[in-house]
Image (cartoon, rainbow, N blue to C red):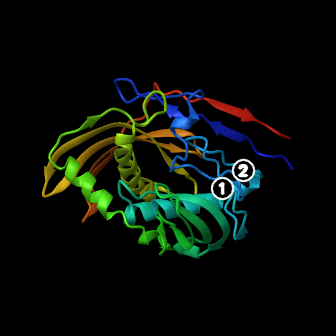
Amino acid sequence: MSLSSLVFLAVLLGVNGSPSVTIRPEASSTDISGHPNSLPETADETDTSGQVRVLEVVEAEEDEMATGELNPNHYPAQRAANVVRHYLNTRYGSPYRVFTLNRVHSGNAEDMADAGRKYQLEISVQDFISNKTEKCSAEVLFPRGEPQDSPSVQASCEELLKIDTKAQEEAWYQQNKNQSLVTAHLPDSYGHIDPGNEPLWHLGIVAASFIMLNESTENTLYNMAQVANVTQLETENDQLKFDYYILLHDMVSQEIIHWKLLFTWSPAEGVKVLQKELMPKCHHCETVEVMANTN
């Protein structure tokens, strides 16, 4: 039985002028270690050395929709589990609370006829900022039909929700309430994020989770790759208002997908997406892939 390819995607870097991108393999991993959009390489190891970790698909057949018990490390279980982190970010995320998938312990898929496919998962979810991790039970239903609705998610991660970030959020809110702030792409062309801009990066991940949750199917696996541009607009109704240009990476198709997001945030109201727009494909973007085929 042949083994499928290992795909190594280099860190997404470099947006100069217009929001076109170049993916370069030489970026320093120390500047982006512990990226909150990373995927675990194996069930027993979490790699924190790069922006996008390697996901190994051991058997090509695993990419097909299977029922019953799933290999926790293969695409079907990983896709469903990553939908859970997007869901948690949309519900509870903030500039100081970002959820990431730490590990898939077990998974089971069930065909629900016309309703879709339901995944029962046992996963470990990590709060990227505090590094606290909790084992959670989750259920993801990918509905059938055209146009396809967004996945339905139920998840129980009560201990992570007890992490108190109110003081940090209020201080950042007051600091930025009465100022206009324009920031270039995050990370910058060297893969670095200035510590003062980290809350903006985290906020971008949370806002992008609304898109990634809505767009996720059994055939996608999304990460936010870069904030190409962020502009803080005039505060309205006590809500900080932002215009983000973000780049998403679908690890299945290897596409870099461009979106614009207009949203507000406050400690009391969280993220509220006002507008989202899928941008035309970038014809100047380059990717670097290293393929290793094993027979």
The residues tagged by marks 1 and 2 sit, at their Cα atoms, a distance apart of 7 Å
Q: Secondary structure at mark 2?
A: loop
- Looking at the image, which residue is at 39% across and 41% down? 195
Q: Could you classify mark 2 by the number of other residues whose Cα lies within 10 Å: few (under 14), some (14-19), or many (20 or more)?
A: some
Residue 118, given in percent of the width and then of the height, sits at 58, 72
Residue 184 shown left or right of residue 117 in the figure: left
Residue under label 2, please give it: 57
- Looking at the image, which residue is at 37% across and 34% down? 185
Q: Which mark is residue 75?
A: 1
> Three-letter amino acid code at disc 1?
Tyr
> Three-letter amino acid code at disc 2?
Val
Residue 271 shown left or right of residue 7 in the figure: left
Contact flag, marks 1 and 2 (Cβ < 8 Å): yes
Residue nearest the viewer, comparing 19 with 156: 156
| Residue 293 in sight | yes
Residue nearest the viewer, comparing 258 with 271: 271
